[in-house]
Image (spheres, coloured by chain):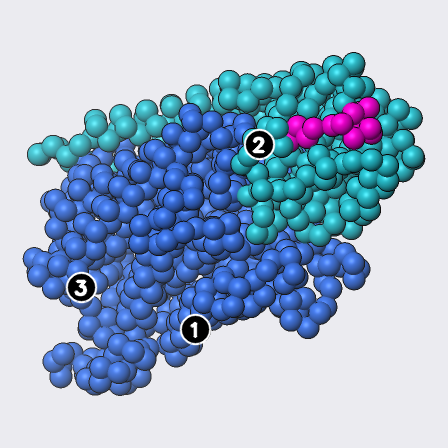
Chain colours: A blue, B cyan
Amino acid sequence: MSQAAAAVQTDTHAEHHEELSFLYKYILPVDHKIIGMQYIFTGMIMAIIGGYFAYAFRMQLAFPGELVPLYGLVGPGEYNMLVTNHGTIMIFWVAMPVLIAGFGNYLIPLMIGCDDMVFPRLNRLSYQIFLVSALVLIASFFVRGGGFGGAWTSYPPLSSVAEYSLTDWGASLWILAVALEFVSFLLGGINFVTTSMNARAPGMKMLDIPIAVWFIVVAVILFMASVGPLVAGAVMLFMDQRIGTTFFLPSGGGDPLLWQHLFWFFGHPEVYVVLLPTLGIVAEIITVFSRKKLFGYRTVLYTAFATGGLSFVVWAHHQFIAGIDPRMANVFTVTTVLISIPLAEMMFSYIATLYGGSIELKTPMLWALSFIAAFLIGGVTGIYLGASAMDVYFHDSYFVLAHFHYTFFPITIIGMFAALTYWFPKMFGRMMNETLGKIHFWGTFIPFNCIFLPLFFLGLAGQHRRIYNYEHFPDLATQELQNIRIFATVSLVVMLIFQLVFIYNFFVSMFKGKKAPNNPWNANTLEWTIPSPPQHGNFKDLPTVYRGPYEYSVPGREKDYWPQNEPPEEN
Amino acid sequence: MIEYFVENASSFAGDIDNLFLVITLIIGFWFFLTFGILVYFIVKFRRKDGVKAKYFAGEKHSETKWTHYPHYAVIAMDVVIIAVNIMVWVNIKQTLPPRDNLVRVIGQQWTWSFIHAGPDGELDTPDDVATVNDLHLKLGDTYHFELQSRDVLHNFAVPAFRLRQDAVPGRTISGWFKPTKTGTYDLQCAEMCGYGHGIMGAAVTVHSAESYETTMAQIQNGTYESHYQKRMGTKTSLPSNTSQVDEEGSFAVLLASIF
């Protein structure tokens, strides 16, 4: 950092340019980039735990009662604990930290052209609480009685009465961990919204903000607006467990359905909370790699608002047959099916963006396109489940499971890989190996479909969820169905093995990869105008923005991209 | 399509299968259309040297019609799905046709108890017949069920009937079904209910009229052999009260063990 450049900075930023000790740079950072990476790395470690759990219980399903290599015997209680915590980890400790907190932290200040989040210390506190929540969750696996096994939805009375769940402390630590995690993201969320609204580079109008930033902001607003009831519910559940209140216990005048309303009032917007950041990431990648302006920027943005708004009035489609008034189901069917309207429009816009493009199938683009393809399956199968009468058959079946894995897997895993491979050069200043990246892509995407497509058919056959061994259900214990289970499990193992390619590629490229230029993909957004990796404080001179983020292949220009901060040519 | 995997053994199973077919046709059309266009674009617009990408914003009407018109079609198809769905739903869950027979279904960790109304068609009378993990139904009777739970949430699920309904402690939930095919089917608990969730199954047997009477008589005189246990072979470790019924007083013992 040259003295001359430092002098240009306003005085409030001067402190950023002192050399920080290792402790303050990497362990207790206030720099949004380091905090973002802390979130991403924590999320990836949790993803390994979640994947390991999936491996253990899938092996039990395929080969019931046999010792699972690298795990051991999976009994019924253990099976419940594994599926419960697989779900919890993948949603709350992988999707949320990586997509929202991780990439949100890393990208928002870089993409809107400011030096850091507006509340850097709040940001650091947010990560620290998140880390504590992850540790509390991991601790819950080792207490007396084992980890919580009442499904990630933790419906009371099973979750609120220790005699029913048989996991006295596991259940309490689980709900405590979830509540802590929400506190963490509330702190982070307020920071994201404030930063994006108040700290944009001069000239960046609302409709010049990259879609990735917009969608994270919308997601965070959804999260903050919906999480309140669930935090209240979590406190009530904790009190039911520990001090004997009866909010959810009918014998004491409570109602188990209350929890379901509180949970799903949060739980359904939550789906869009994790979906929107990935949609934003995909928008960035498909425009760059097809050299095209995004089709209908405003349409895409408004459909996200519409999806977000609608997502608050669909929650009871998780409860069609839970004992709610059946007349209510009709209302929620209508709202649920209506969600297909903005989302279909958004998907059409994304596909229309490819029209007339100059598509280059680099690894990030493969991930982004595969997201669209996989999410289409997840989206259309959602229509079945939005229809209340179909739910009479599909509730808690493998059809539901296959459906939401076709949404959550693309969102979480494909979205994470798309973002990581795309911004890797910016994060670490080196390029990832393209060949290994493609091997990893195909080695993940093909087995992914082999795992979850067959599960739709198991759902059609009436197979219900969270059963450790189908031998107890003669109609489901046939050899044909068992073969499908084995096929899915083998595909999962293949997919997990291919993740080693990614881990190898990731770490070797981080230290030995080809040096990355400032703008390896010829992209327009502001993060690509500064060195890779960006210095502390990001920009030497805060940029001025002249145009929207997707001005690719503008006619009459020699270069097919036009960075947002490049002054217009004088004529 | 569903009947290819599971028998349809209730009067409304066909409705649900048809709804499934309607939705499959509609979304299948959209899926293959959209997926086809996506693949076509990816293949057609691969990078070629010297060919520059088109530049348009997708804001003008001449451009947006390509996404808006299909989008209006999506809305129209949504209306169809909603309409068909509501017809089926109202029939299954919102209306209660007059009953021929009555049964009380009680879920508890991790077993099902059934109280059949007996000849008088009323519950809580002396001619009630109670069984554990064995539900016996008469072909063609419209059954009302009273669903209860003793402890946590359970879900009364019979795939062959296309029926699922949560049992909520503290409530009695009513519903109906009408078996239309004889045979023995799986009954599942389809809501996570704790350690034994994976073994909480039962057998539903749909009898012809005379077979039904014989079975009921067998249950009452203690010569009955549990269909559930027969079906499970030796795989189950769950004791079934019904198979151990003996001599006088045993029925009272059985009831006492249930309540």
Q: Is residue B186 left or right of residue A118?
A: right
Q: What secondary structure is marked by label 1?
A: helix
What's the residue type where badge 2 is placed? Met
What's the residue type where badge 3 is placed? Phe
> What's the mark number on residue A132?
1
Q: Is residue A67 left or right of residue B115?
A: left
Q: What secondary structure is marked by label 2?
A: helix
Q: Residues within 10 Å of mark 1 (few under 14, many from 20)?
A: some
Magenta stretch, overall SS: helix
Tell me whether marks 3 and 1 sit on the same chain.
yes
- Alpha carbon distance from label 2 to label 1: 47 Å
- Alpha carbon distance from label 3 to label 1: 27 Å
Q: Is residue B244 magenta?
A: no
Tag nearer the camera, 2 or 1: 2
Q: Residues within 10 Å of mark 3 (few under 14, many from 20)?
A: some
In this rendering, the answer to whether A78 lies above or below A19 is above
